[in-house]
Image (cartoon, grey):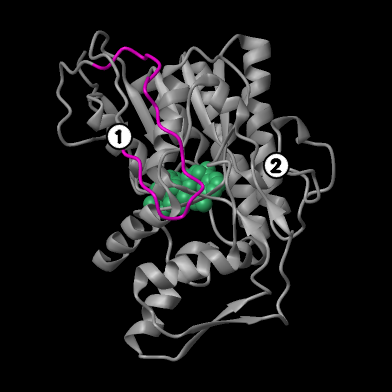
Amino acid sequence: MSIPSSPYLSVIPGSHEESQLSTLFPSSSLPTADCQLSSLHLPTATCPLPTHPFKIFIAGHRGMVGSAIVRLLQEKGYQNLLVTTREELDLTNQSEVHGFLAAEKPDYIFLAAAKVGGIHANNTFRADFIYENLVIETNIVHAAWKAGVKRLLFLGSSCIYPRDCPQPIREEYLLTGPLEQTNEPYAIAKIAGIKLCESYNRQYGTSYVSVMPTNLYGPNDNYDLLGSHVLPALIRKAHEAKLRGEQSLTVWGTGTPRREFLYVDDMAEACIFVMESGVQDGLFNVGTGCDVTIRELAETVKQVVGFEGTINFDTSHPDGTPRKLLDVSRMKALGWEAKTPLIAGITKAYKEFLKT
Ligand code: NDP
């Protein structure tokens, strides 16, 4: 299949006009994440190659998740990958998105483009978070349906669930209670994305599936302290404290809240796994199923970075919800589990951070 030329289109290096893609097949032999902080499992997954010339659009390919999806698709032998930069295609621009998808007619879409940030960014830029995320989703989902896109994977977020819902969090808890206020606009946009997929499936028979990642980290993460999530912020703070030879590092809160962290390559694997599976509809939590306290997280970062000072906790800052852990049994039942232990993932992330 030749890739139509397009003013917006970039093709991943290595793509060829007559490229062929893998059969979308379930992976096998998938390993499990280890709740221990220190052990490492690295078994392999297999995927039969190739039989059909599918075209795959990865929206948000320069981001942390999108770039991990592209890396893994390429590793698995998928070649006909479509990507566009924001400069080539602004996903908030309805006519550009409709023109692009009508011209390119991809078979599959990974929707990993979004406005993303930590609590500070979410709480400060509330209008931008709800507006941009709603517009990107509605543009892509509607244009995908019009262009006859077979399957689409929408990336939501675990913040869609009620602030005080039971732990671990099951998919069924969606819309059963009030949301956390600091990121409510972002969460509402993500819930709308899930409902968009569900509604197009019901009315038009599409196969648009949603995945809800827990906290992610890894290569291409955002290390800007004003916009970042807790783990990249800790990596950067510990690294800078080490370089400055400081005796201590201060972390906000008591250190007791429990959180879950998934290495982004595992997330990419889960996304491709769901896309390759026969799943046609629904919502899937993606996490490790294990959580750690913020204190344990900070100690692990300290160990990886080699910061030798002490970690202090500034209890004048709020802790947020005491625990946030996804129930991942739905993904387990499909046959997928995370495999990267936290310390191994943080070690890889820190190596990448040092290159930036
Ligand atoms: P990033 O911020 O790293 O990447 C987002 C990507 O979207 C970037 O490539 C960005 O382009 C692109 N993008 C945003 N707006 C536009 C636009 N208007 N036009 C074109 N491209 C645009 O996010 P992540 O990779 O971390 O997140 C991916 C998905 O996973 C998101 O849906 C997010 O909500 C979800 N998620 C992420 C979590 C995390 O911990 N990071 C946790 C839970 C869910 P550019 O490179 O030009 O900025």
Q: Where does residue 140 sit, x and y in percent of width and height? A: 51, 31
Q: Rounded to the nearest whole Å, what is the CA distance between mark 1 and mark 2?
A: 29 Å
Q: Residues within 10 Å of mark 1 (few under 14, many from 20)?
A: some
Location of residue 200 in the rendering, given as x and y in whole percent from the top left corner = 63, 18
Question: Can residue 230 be seen in this snapshot?
Answer: yes
Q: Nearer the viewer, mark 1 or mark 2?
A: 2
Start-end of magenta stretch? 21-42
Q: Quarter holding the N terminus?
A: top left
Q: Tell me the tag on residue 168.
A: 2
Q: Is residue 252 above or below residue 149?
A: below
Q: Is mark 1 within 8 Å of ligand 1?
A: no
Image x and y of residue 43, in percent: 31, 33
Q: Is residue 34 inside the magenta stretch?
A: yes
Image quarter in which the C terminus is found:
bottom left
Specify few, some or many for label 2: CA neighbours under 10 Å numbering under 14, 14-19, or 20 or more.
some
In this figure, what is the number of numbered marks? Answer: 2
Residue 68 drawn above or below residue 330: below
Front residue of 48 and 43:
43
Q: Residue at x 81, y 50 (%)?
A: 164
Q: Is residue 61 visible?
A: no
Residue, disc 1: 72
Label 1 vs 2, first from the N-terminus: 1
Callout 2: CB less than 8 Å from ligand 1: no
The kind of residue on which mark 2 rests is: Pro
User: Quick check: marks 1 and 2 in contact, CB under 8 Å?
Assistant: no
Q: Element type at marker 1?
A: helix
Q: Amino acid at mark 1?
A: Leu
Q: Which picture quadrant has residue 142?
A: top right
Snapshot quadrant of residue 205: top right
Secondary structure that dominates the magenta span: loop
In the image, residue 237 lies in the stretch drawn in magenta: no
SS at badge 2: loop
